[in-house]
Amino acid sequence: MNTLADQVVEFTITLVRALQRVGQFEPATANFPRVRARLWKELGRLQRTQPEIGYLVGPPAVAGGAPELWVDGTSPMRVELRRIVGSSIGGAFILQLLEYMQRRGLVILSFSRGITEPEWNAFLEIMSEPFVDKSPAGEGQRLSRALLAKKVVHVSLVCDAEQTQVQGDLPWQVRLAYARLLRDLRAEAASGQFTPARLYEQSERLIAGMAYSYFRKFDVVRQMLFRADIVDRLLHEIPTLRQVEVLGLMVHGLPIVSLHGTTNLVFKELPSADQAPPEPAASVLRAITERMLKMPSSRQVDETLRAMCRRQIVPITRLPVELQEWVLAESWVDALRTDPAADPSRGSADSNPVRILQKGARYAFTQKLFPQASGILQRIGTLDRKAVPAVFDVPTVEAVLEILPTGADEKRGMLALLEQGGQTAANSTATVLSTSEQKVSEMAAWILTQMKSAGVAAALLALDQDIEKEETVRLLLGCVAGKAPDSAAPAFIRQLAHKSSRIRRDALTALAAASPAAADLHVAHALADPDESVRIRALLLCASSGVGGAKVIPRAIKIVSEDARGAPPQVVRAAIEVVIRRWEAGALAVVQAEAALCRLAAPIGVLGRLFGQTPPPAAVLVTAIAALGRLGTERAARLLVKLERSKEPEVAQAAQRLLDGVGDQTPIEPTSSPDVADGK
């Protein structure tokens, strides 16, 4: 199924067959579990691209005609199901589903993206049961009660009789949501266990059980909060529910992400940031503020409460001291825009002047007010020099780095500014590097490189975390290349398991430079890496420094003497370097090196050709010839004379140059660049 229409068609067909209990879709049959699983799979496929999918009995498409079946969740607007699936299917399954919903007394049948498989199975079992109530409205109420009893809140049902009780000029989504909430509140009142405290304990379930999971549709949530008085008037008709305030209940039960999103939406619609908002926005914002005042501190909650205070929703005295200082600092920095000589407020007796200055500097940086921020830093340094680094938290450093200077003087100025923050600024810079876009990350990497020991420590701390993005890890590895201490080994070892071969290769190089003892085992293990470039890097690291030699050298000898005609050419060339350079370092006997190289480079005789042996590639032979020249033994010299007569021009020329004393004996460089290790 490639298109949305195809997905809706397939799901509609299978849903109708399952609900109508036709043929093999009988729930009592042995085949039903497989069909139920198929339906679940199709629903999941459909909802991967849609927040939710819902079928609604709506107005007729043609004036005077029969009610139509509409679909929501497939676009910002409700869409007729016929328009999605086409007329060919409209005469069959659409009408069957419409008839089913009308007989059951349902005006909406919706499935939210968050539905779980147990909830889906419970829904199918309940909806496949025979009809019990004779009236459609009663049947709809029975089904809704049965689902609530099963704690199925992601599948929403609202029967027609309950929807019509909510009047007013409301969008259909809000009417359905209110109808569901009103029904659930009445059920709570009739349960015999009703108390206001218990109602608020159940608020999350009640709000989640409304007609849709509108938690990310902030415009719909805003309308629901603004018009909550409609449900209040209906509840006042019930004596036990007169004390329930729907606005407070909804704010208490909504997810925090919905409250933040709705608050930001309301703020954008207000005419001024300095004036108290009008009703009903003021009442909604006050209710949201009351909930947030009881929540644990977090960056998002704190920022929202500060905005509420600045907009006169909540008095500053109700905020914790930490937030009071933030509000005072932000107001002072805003005043500095027009009056550079303005002094900060001292706040209450519990406020700290230095903390207010610190918050003012952070706010100035985030607002891109760099002259004011620099002046505040100087003021902090005069009062308490040790208090300056605390200014450079992650949002502050992020605001500084987003400038992206191009000139050398601008870069040095940024570096001098961040160096005032010491290790705190370095740690924040590493965090920004890990989370920002490419250009900002590159600037952060340059800053860390220039901050020397503080930058190395911060980069190592970041490398010790799980980072999926390859380019981020490479930038961090570049910050510590050749500078990391022996204690950095665990951070590099962690990256040896990265899915990127380039990261594994660079981490292996960094580990060998920082801690040869720790790298010994890992370099040997890298010879089994599935990527050729990592194996080459391990061989070249052993060749240059001897790291992992106890296991790598025997493996290199085997590659050169036995596997050269089957192994990748660049791996063989790297193995040759291991053999010759470890002999030069005294870690390998000349007899072993000579035997391996001569066996590789020796021309194939008549018997060998009869058995189908082929010579190694010319590039491998040229590297082997250079190694024989460096070896300088009598046997090597005799072999070079034979190779001088080779039919391969490159091989013959390489042997001739060595016999003439002008051969190139430059080894492969193991760590000069990533491409060298790849043999590119």
Image (cartoon, rainbow, N blue to C red):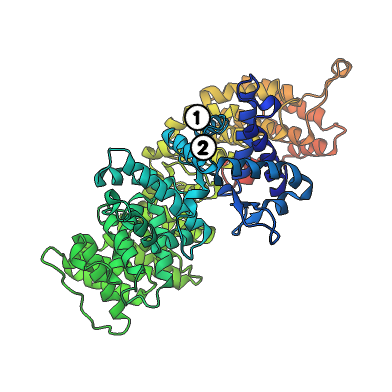
State the residue at coordinates (78%, 32%): 617
Q: Gap between marks 2 and 1, in whole Å?
A: 8 Å
Which amino acid, by three-letter code, is at mark 1? His
Tell me if residue 301 comes above or below residue 265 in the rendering: above
Q: Which residue is mark 2?
A: 508
Q: Are marks 2 and 1 in contact (CB under 8 Å)?
A: yes
**Number of the label disc, if any, that sits on residue 231:** none
81 relative position to 515: left or right: right
Q: Which residue is mark 1?
A: 522
State the residue at coordinates (29%, 71%): 310
Tell me if residue 218 comes above or below residue 505 in the rendering: below
As helix, strand or loop, the secondary structure at mark 1 comes to helix
Which amino acid, by three-letter code, is at mark 2? Leu
State the residue at coordinates (20%, 59%): 320
Let me know if residue 669 appears in the view: no
Tell me if residue 73 comes above or below residue 365 in the rendering: above
Instruction: Work out whether residue 596 or residue 320 is closer to the camera in this orientation and state it.
Output: 320
**Residue 214, percent across and down?**
48, 53
